[in-house]
Amino acid sequence: MILHPTRILHTLRRVTLRLSPPGRRHLAKVQDRIDDEHTRPGLTDLDEEYFLDGPAGAIKVYRTGPTDARYTVVFIHGFTLAADAYFAQVDFIREQFPEVACLLLDLRGHGDTAERGVDPDTLTIDGTADDVIAVIEHAAKQGDLLLVGHSMGGMTAFSVLRRAPQQIAKRIVGLVAIDTAVNPMAAAGTPQLLATQVGKRFIEAVVEDPDHADELRHTLRGLLAPALAATVFHREAVAYDLVEFHASMIDRTPTPTFVGFYPDLRDHDERDVATALADLPGAIVVGEQDDVTPVSQAKQIHKLWPKASFVTVDTCGHMAVLEAPAEVNTAIADVLEETSSYRRKFPTRKRAEADKQGEREAKADHG
Protein backbone atom coordinates (compact mmCIF):
# COMPACT_ATOMS: atom_id res chain seq x y z
CA MET A 1 0.00 0.00 0.00
CA ILE A 2 1.41 3.37 -1.08
CA LEU A 3 0.16 6.53 0.65
CA HIS A 4 -0.40 9.47 -1.68
CA PRO A 5 1.07 12.79 -0.43
CA THR A 6 -2.39 14.40 -0.29
CA ARG A 7 -3.62 11.62 2.01
CA ILE A 8 -0.60 12.09 4.25
CA LEU A 9 -1.37 15.81 4.48
CA HIS A 10 -5.02 15.01 5.22
CA THR A 11 -3.90 12.72 8.03
CA LEU A 12 -1.58 15.34 9.49
CA ARG A 13 -4.45 17.84 9.48
CA ARG A 14 -6.57 15.38 11.47
CA VAL A 15 -3.79 14.90 14.01
CA THR A 16 -3.31 18.67 14.29
CA LEU A 17 -7.05 19.11 14.75
CA ARG A 18 -6.89 17.04 17.90
CA LEU A 19 -4.19 19.23 19.41
CA SER A 20 -5.90 22.63 19.16
CA PRO A 21 -8.70 23.89 21.46
CA PRO A 22 -11.02 24.69 18.49
CA GLY A 23 -10.28 21.27 17.06
CA ARG A 24 -11.12 19.53 20.33
CA ARG A 25 -14.38 21.48 20.58
CA HIS A 26 -15.25 20.48 17.01
CA LEU A 27 -14.49 16.83 17.72
CA ALA A 28 -16.63 16.95 20.85
CA LYS A 29 -19.58 18.12 18.73
CA VAL A 30 -18.90 15.36 16.21
CA GLN A 31 -18.83 12.74 18.96
CA ASP A 32 -22.02 14.09 20.55
CA ARG A 33 -23.80 13.64 17.22
CA ILE A 34 -22.42 10.12 16.79
CA ASP A 35 -23.55 9.19 20.31
CA ASP A 36 -27.07 10.60 19.82
CA GLU A 37 -29.33 7.73 18.72
CA HIS A 38 -31.79 10.22 17.21
CA THR A 39 -29.35 11.76 14.72
CA ARG A 40 -27.33 10.49 11.77
CA PRO A 41 -24.77 9.03 11.23
CA GLY A 42 -26.24 5.84 12.63
CA LEU A 43 -29.60 4.09 12.52
CA THR A 44 -32.58 6.29 13.44
CA ASP A 45 -36.38 6.02 13.57
CA LEU A 46 -36.35 2.24 13.93
CA ASP A 47 -39.63 0.35 14.16
CA GLU A 48 -38.15 -2.29 16.47
CA GLU A 49 -34.96 -2.93 18.39
CA TYR A 50 -34.53 -5.64 20.98
CA PHE A 51 -32.29 -8.43 22.24
CA LEU A 52 -32.86 -11.98 21.03
CA ASP A 53 -31.51 -15.10 22.71
CA GLY A 54 -29.06 -16.47 20.15
CA PRO A 55 -26.83 -19.53 19.81
CA ALA A 56 -23.96 -17.86 21.70
CA GLY A 57 -25.85 -15.35 23.83
CA ALA A 58 -28.01 -12.27 23.36
CA ILE A 59 -28.08 -10.65 19.90
CA LYS A 60 -29.16 -7.04 19.33
CA VAL A 61 -31.73 -6.88 16.51
CA TYR A 62 -32.98 -3.86 14.56
CA ARG A 63 -35.93 -3.78 12.18
CA THR A 64 -37.77 -1.31 9.96
CA GLY A 65 -40.68 -1.73 7.57
CA PRO A 66 -43.96 -3.67 7.51
CA THR A 67 -44.28 -6.54 9.97
CA ASP A 68 -45.93 -8.63 7.25
CA ALA A 69 -43.40 -7.74 4.53
CA ARG A 70 -43.12 -10.20 1.65
CA TYR A 71 -39.50 -9.13 1.06
CA THR A 72 -36.76 -8.43 3.62
CA VAL A 73 -33.26 -7.05 3.13
CA VAL A 74 -30.90 -8.57 5.71
CA PHE A 75 -27.85 -6.39 6.37
CA ILE A 76 -24.70 -8.04 7.79
CA HIS A 77 -21.95 -5.71 8.98
CA GLY A 78 -18.19 -6.14 8.91
CA PHE A 79 -15.49 -6.77 11.51
CA THR A 80 -15.26 -4.10 14.26
CA LEU A 81 -18.37 -2.38 12.89
CA ALA A 82 -22.05 -2.60 13.86
CA ALA A 83 -25.50 -2.44 12.29
CA ASP A 84 -25.24 1.36 12.46
CA ALA A 85 -22.79 1.26 9.53
CA TYR A 86 -25.73 0.66 7.17
CA PHE A 87 -27.73 3.76 8.09
CA ALA A 88 -27.51 5.27 4.58
CA GLN A 89 -28.68 2.04 2.95
CA VAL A 90 -31.58 1.60 5.40
CA ASP A 91 -32.70 5.20 4.80
CA PHE A 92 -32.59 4.51 1.07
CA ILE A 93 -34.65 1.29 1.24
CA ARG A 94 -37.27 2.92 3.47
CA GLU A 95 -37.68 5.82 1.05
CA GLN A 96 -37.51 3.91 -2.23
CA PHE A 97 -39.18 0.61 -1.27
CA PRO A 98 -41.59 1.26 1.63
CA GLU A 99 -43.15 -2.21 1.22
CA VAL A 100 -39.79 -3.84 1.98
CA ALA A 101 -38.48 -4.59 5.49
CA CYS A 102 -34.90 -4.06 6.66
CA LEU A 103 -33.45 -6.48 9.22
CA LEU A 104 -30.12 -5.86 10.93
CA LEU A 105 -28.16 -7.22 13.87
CA ASP A 106 -24.99 -6.55 15.82
CA LEU A 107 -23.00 -9.75 15.31
CA ARG A 108 -21.44 -11.54 18.30
CA GLY A 109 -18.61 -9.49 19.77
CA HIS A 110 -19.83 -6.25 18.17
CA GLY A 111 -21.99 -3.23 18.97
CA ASP A 112 -24.69 -3.60 21.59
CA THR A 113 -24.40 -7.39 21.39
CA ALA A 114 -20.87 -7.17 22.79
CA GLU A 115 -22.16 -5.31 25.84
CA ARG A 116 -23.89 -8.55 26.90
CA GLY A 117 -20.51 -10.31 27.00
CA VAL A 118 -17.91 -11.74 24.63
CA ASP A 119 -16.67 -15.34 24.58
CA PRO A 120 -13.60 -15.43 22.29
CA ASP A 121 -14.03 -19.18 21.77
CA THR A 122 -17.30 -18.56 19.87
CA LEU A 123 -15.95 -15.89 17.51
CA THR A 124 -15.89 -17.46 14.05
CA ILE A 125 -17.37 -16.65 10.65
CA ASP A 126 -19.67 -19.68 10.88
CA GLY A 127 -20.69 -18.48 14.34
CA THR A 128 -21.77 -15.11 12.96
CA ALA A 129 -23.75 -16.96 10.28
CA ASP A 130 -25.54 -18.83 13.07
CA ASP A 131 -26.47 -15.42 14.54
CA VAL A 132 -27.93 -14.29 11.21
CA ILE A 133 -29.88 -17.53 10.77
CA ALA A 134 -31.32 -17.22 14.29
CA VAL A 135 -32.42 -13.64 13.65
CA ILE A 136 -34.06 -14.56 10.33
CA GLU A 137 -35.90 -17.47 11.97
CA HIS A 138 -37.28 -15.11 14.60
CA ALA A 139 -37.84 -11.81 12.77
CA ALA A 140 -38.36 -12.69 9.08
CA LYS A 141 -40.48 -15.83 9.12
CA GLN A 142 -42.00 -15.30 5.70
CA GLY A 143 -41.19 -13.87 2.29
CA ASP A 144 -38.11 -13.48 0.15
CA LEU A 145 -34.71 -12.54 1.55
CA LEU A 146 -31.94 -10.40 0.05
CA LEU A 147 -28.63 -10.68 1.92
CA VAL A 148 -26.27 -7.69 1.98
CA GLY A 149 -22.84 -8.36 3.47
CA HIS A 150 -19.86 -6.03 3.83
CA SER A 151 -16.30 -7.26 4.49
CA MET A 152 -16.51 -9.99 7.15
CA GLY A 153 -20.27 -9.68 6.74
CA GLY A 154 -19.88 -10.84 3.15
CA MET A 155 -18.10 -13.96 4.32
CA THR A 156 -20.87 -14.42 6.88
CA ALA A 157 -23.44 -14.20 4.07
CA PHE A 158 -21.57 -16.89 2.13
CA SER A 159 -21.63 -19.09 5.22
CA VAL A 160 -25.38 -18.51 5.58
CA LEU A 161 -25.86 -19.62 1.97
CA ARG A 162 -23.86 -22.81 2.64
CA ARG A 163 -25.30 -23.72 6.00
CA ALA A 164 -28.82 -22.32 6.39
CA PRO A 165 -31.68 -24.77 6.92
CA GLN A 166 -33.58 -25.50 3.71
CA GLN A 167 -36.63 -23.53 4.83
CA ILE A 168 -34.45 -20.39 4.94
CA ALA A 169 -32.08 -21.20 2.07
CA LYS A 170 -34.95 -21.54 -0.41
CA ARG A 171 -36.17 -18.04 0.49
CA ILE A 172 -32.84 -16.32 -0.25
CA VAL A 173 -33.34 -14.74 -3.68
CA GLY A 174 -30.27 -12.53 -3.93
CA LEU A 175 -26.99 -11.33 -2.46
CA VAL A 176 -24.99 -8.11 -2.56
CA ALA A 177 -21.37 -8.79 -1.53
CA ILE A 178 -19.45 -5.60 -0.72
CA ASP A 179 -15.67 -5.34 -0.20
CA THR A 180 -15.34 -8.99 0.80
CA ALA A 181 -13.59 -12.27 -0.07
CA VAL A 182 -14.07 -16.00 -0.54
CA ASN A 183 -10.36 -16.77 -0.26
CA PRO A 184 -8.72 -16.46 3.15
CA MET A 185 -8.38 -12.75 3.85
CA ALA A 186 -4.68 -13.18 4.55
CA ALA A 187 -4.21 -14.18 0.91
CA ALA A 188 -4.19 -10.59 -0.38
CA GLY A 189 -4.21 -6.96 0.73
CA THR A 190 -3.24 -5.60 4.13
CA PRO A 191 -4.69 -8.66 5.98
CA GLN A 192 -1.62 -10.53 4.74
CA LEU A 193 0.00 -8.98 7.82
CA LEU A 194 -2.12 -11.35 9.92
CA ALA A 195 -0.21 -14.33 8.53
CA THR A 196 3.25 -12.92 9.23
CA GLN A 197 5.31 -13.71 12.31
CA VAL A 198 4.88 -10.08 13.40
CA GLY A 199 1.10 -10.40 13.18
CA LYS A 200 1.08 -13.69 15.07
CA ARG A 201 3.35 -12.34 17.81
CA PHE A 202 1.20 -9.25 18.19
CA ILE A 203 -1.91 -11.37 18.79
CA GLU A 204 0.01 -13.64 21.17
CA ALA A 205 1.06 -10.57 23.15
CA VAL A 206 -2.54 -9.37 23.38
CA VAL A 207 -3.72 -12.79 24.56
CA GLU A 208 -1.01 -12.95 27.22
CA ASP A 209 -1.65 -9.44 28.56
CA PRO A 210 -5.14 -8.19 27.62
CA ASP A 211 -5.14 -5.45 30.29
CA HIS A 212 -2.02 -3.92 28.81
CA ALA A 213 -3.58 -4.17 25.35
CA ASP A 214 -6.63 -2.24 26.57
CA GLU A 215 -4.37 0.44 28.04
CA LEU A 216 -2.49 0.71 24.77
CA ARG A 217 -5.73 1.00 22.78
CA HIS A 218 -6.90 3.77 25.11
CA THR A 219 -3.61 5.62 24.68
CA LEU A 220 -3.72 5.37 20.89
CA ARG A 221 -7.43 6.00 20.39
CA GLY A 222 -6.81 9.62 19.37
CA LEU A 223 -4.76 8.42 16.42
CA LEU A 224 -7.32 5.92 15.17
CA ALA A 225 -9.33 8.29 12.98
CA PRO A 226 -6.24 9.83 11.34
CA ALA A 227 -4.93 6.33 10.64
CA LEU A 228 -8.24 5.36 9.03
CA ALA A 229 -8.19 8.53 6.95
CA ALA A 230 -4.77 7.55 5.63
CA THR A 231 -5.36 3.86 5.00
CA VAL A 232 -9.08 3.12 4.53
CA PHE A 233 -10.96 6.17 3.25
CA HIS A 234 -10.07 7.58 -0.16
CA ARG A 235 -12.80 10.11 -0.87
CA GLU A 236 -13.15 13.55 0.67
CA ALA A 237 -15.34 13.39 3.77
CA VAL A 238 -18.96 14.50 3.48
CA ALA A 239 -20.64 16.73 6.06
CA TYR A 240 -20.91 13.79 8.43
CA ASP A 241 -17.48 13.00 9.75
CA LEU A 242 -17.66 9.40 8.61
CA VAL A 243 -14.04 8.72 9.53
CA GLU A 244 -14.81 9.60 13.16
CA PHE A 245 -18.00 7.52 12.96
CA HIS A 246 -16.02 4.50 11.72
CA ALA A 247 -13.38 5.07 14.41
CA SER A 248 -16.05 5.18 17.12
CA MET A 249 -17.33 1.72 16.13
CA ILE A 250 -13.81 0.28 16.17
CA ASP A 251 -13.08 1.94 19.50
CA ARG A 252 -16.23 0.38 20.95
CA THR A 253 -15.21 -3.14 19.88
CA PRO A 254 -13.83 -5.08 22.88
CA THR A 255 -10.27 -6.39 22.78
CA PRO A 256 -11.48 -10.04 23.16
CA THR A 257 -13.34 -9.60 19.86
CA PHE A 258 -10.10 -8.75 18.06
CA VAL A 259 -8.37 -11.74 19.63
CA GLY A 260 -11.22 -14.20 19.13
CA PHE A 261 -11.80 -13.51 15.43
CA TYR A 262 -8.12 -13.36 14.49
CA PRO A 263 -7.54 -17.02 13.48
CA ASP A 264 -10.71 -17.27 11.40
CA LEU A 265 -10.26 -13.89 9.72
CA ARG A 266 -6.79 -15.03 8.69
CA ASP A 267 -7.67 -18.53 7.46
CA HIS A 268 -11.42 -18.79 6.72
CA ASP A 269 -12.14 -20.07 3.22
CA GLU A 270 -15.57 -19.74 1.57
CA ARG A 271 -14.83 -21.16 -1.88
CA ASP A 272 -17.22 -24.04 -1.19
CA VAL A 273 -20.07 -21.53 -1.53
CA ALA A 274 -19.81 -21.77 -5.34
CA THR A 275 -22.66 -24.28 -5.61
CA ALA A 276 -25.03 -22.09 -3.60
CA LEU A 277 -24.07 -19.03 -5.66
CA ALA A 278 -24.42 -20.67 -9.08
CA ASP A 279 -27.92 -19.48 -10.02
CA LEU A 280 -28.31 -16.71 -7.45
CA PRO A 281 -28.89 -13.14 -8.71
CA GLY A 282 -26.70 -10.52 -7.12
CA ALA A 283 -23.87 -8.03 -7.24
CA ILE A 284 -20.23 -7.86 -6.22
CA VAL A 285 -19.18 -4.35 -5.18
CA VAL A 286 -15.54 -3.41 -4.52
CA GLY A 287 -13.71 -0.16 -3.94
CA GLU A 288 -11.13 0.48 -6.64
CA GLN A 289 -8.58 1.31 -3.93
CA ASP A 290 -9.63 -1.26 -1.34
CA ASP A 291 -6.44 -2.41 0.38
CA VAL A 292 -8.18 -4.79 2.81
CA THR A 293 -10.10 -7.00 0.37
CA PRO A 294 -8.68 -5.71 -2.91
CA VAL A 295 -10.12 -5.99 -6.40
CA SER A 296 -8.20 -9.24 -6.87
CA GLN A 297 -10.29 -10.81 -4.10
CA ALA A 298 -13.51 -9.56 -5.72
CA LYS A 299 -12.44 -11.09 -9.03
CA GLN A 300 -12.00 -14.44 -7.30
CA ILE A 301 -15.61 -14.21 -6.13
CA HIS A 302 -16.72 -13.40 -9.67
CA LYS A 303 -14.97 -16.50 -11.01
CA LEU A 304 -17.13 -18.59 -8.68
CA TRP A 305 -20.22 -16.47 -9.29
CA PRO A 306 -20.26 -15.23 -12.91
CA LYS A 307 -24.01 -14.58 -12.74
CA ALA A 308 -23.41 -11.60 -10.44
CA SER A 309 -22.89 -8.09 -11.74
CA PHE A 310 -19.44 -6.67 -10.95
CA VAL A 311 -19.26 -3.08 -9.71
CA THR A 312 -15.94 -1.31 -9.20
CA VAL A 313 -16.32 1.96 -7.28
CA ASP A 314 -13.85 4.63 -8.36
CA THR A 315 -11.66 6.40 -5.77
CA CYS A 316 -13.11 4.27 -2.98
CA GLY A 317 -11.44 2.18 -0.31
CA HIS A 318 -12.72 -0.62 1.91
CA MET A 319 -15.65 1.23 3.49
CA ALA A 320 -17.91 1.59 0.44
CA VAL A 321 -21.07 1.49 2.59
CA LEU A 322 -19.97 4.78 4.17
CA GLU A 323 -17.68 6.22 1.52
CA ALA A 324 -19.83 5.54 -1.57
CA PRO A 325 -23.44 5.14 -0.37
CA ALA A 326 -24.95 6.12 -3.74
CA GLU A 327 -23.13 3.33 -5.57
CA VAL A 328 -23.93 0.76 -2.88
CA ASN A 329 -27.58 1.85 -2.76
CA THR A 330 -27.85 1.49 -6.52
CA ALA A 331 -26.38 -2.02 -6.46
CA ILE A 332 -28.84 -3.10 -3.77
CA ALA A 333 -31.79 -1.53 -5.58
CA ASP A 334 -30.83 -3.18 -8.86
CA VAL A 335 -30.78 -6.64 -7.27
CA LEU A 336 -33.97 -5.96 -5.33
CA GLU A 337 -35.78 -5.00 -8.54
CA GLU A 338 -34.33 -8.00 -10.38
CA THR A 339 -35.67 -10.37 -7.73
CA SER A 340 -39.07 -8.80 -7.01
CA SER A 341 -41.93 -6.81 -8.51
CA TYR A 342 -41.00 -3.73 -6.46
CA ARG A 343 -39.67 -0.61 -8.21
CA ARG A 344 -37.93 2.52 -6.95
CA LYS A 345 -40.38 5.29 -6.04
CA PHE A 346 -37.84 7.94 -7.04
CA PRO A 347 -35.69 6.42 -9.81
CA THR A 348 -33.36 9.41 -10.17
CA ARG A 349 -32.37 9.48 -6.49
CA LYS A 350 -29.32 7.52 -5.43
CA ARG A 351 -29.41 8.61 -1.80
CA ALA A 352 -32.27 9.07 0.63
CA GLU A 353 -33.53 12.57 1.35
CA ALA A 354 -33.36 11.74 5.08
CA ASP A 355 -29.68 10.92 4.68
CA LYS A 356 -28.95 14.17 2.85
CA GLN A 357 -30.98 16.16 5.38
CA GLY A 358 -28.91 14.57 8.14
CA GLU A 359 -25.78 15.81 6.38
CA ARG A 360 -27.15 19.34 6.22
CA GLU A 361 -28.03 19.26 9.92
CA ALA A 362 -24.58 17.94 10.80
CA LYS A 363 -22.95 20.68 8.75
CA ALA A 364 -25.05 23.32 10.53
CA ASP A 365 -24.23 21.84 13.95
CA HIS A 366 -20.51 21.95 13.29
CA GLY A 367 -20.46 25.37 11.71
Image (cartoon, rainbow, N blue to C red):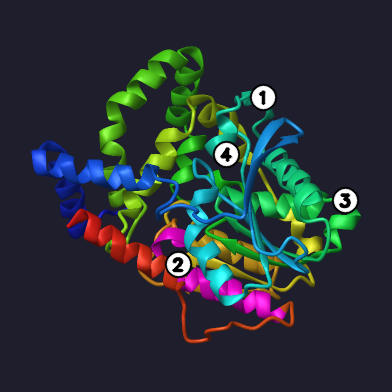
Residue 192, position as x, y percentages in the image = 48, 43
Q: Disc 3 designates what residue?
A: 165
- Labelled disc at residue 325: 2
Residue 259, position as x, y percentages in the image = 53, 27
User: Seen from this angle, which residue lies furthest bottom?
Assistant: 348
The reply to whether residue 313 is in sight is no
Of residues 314 and 114, which is closer to you in this image? 114
Label 4 vs label 1, nearer the camera: 1
Query: Who's the residue at 57% across and 31% down the image?
Result: 114
Q: Earlier in the sequence, mark 1 or mark 2?
A: 1
Tag 1 and tag 2, C-beta contact below 8 Å: no
Tag 3 and tag 4, C-beta contact below 8 Å: no
**Stretch in magenta:** 320-338
Q: Disc 4 designates what residue?
A: 266
Give the spatial CA distance, label 3 vs label 2: 32 Å
Q: Disc 1 designates what residue?
A: 121
Magenta span contains residue 323: yes
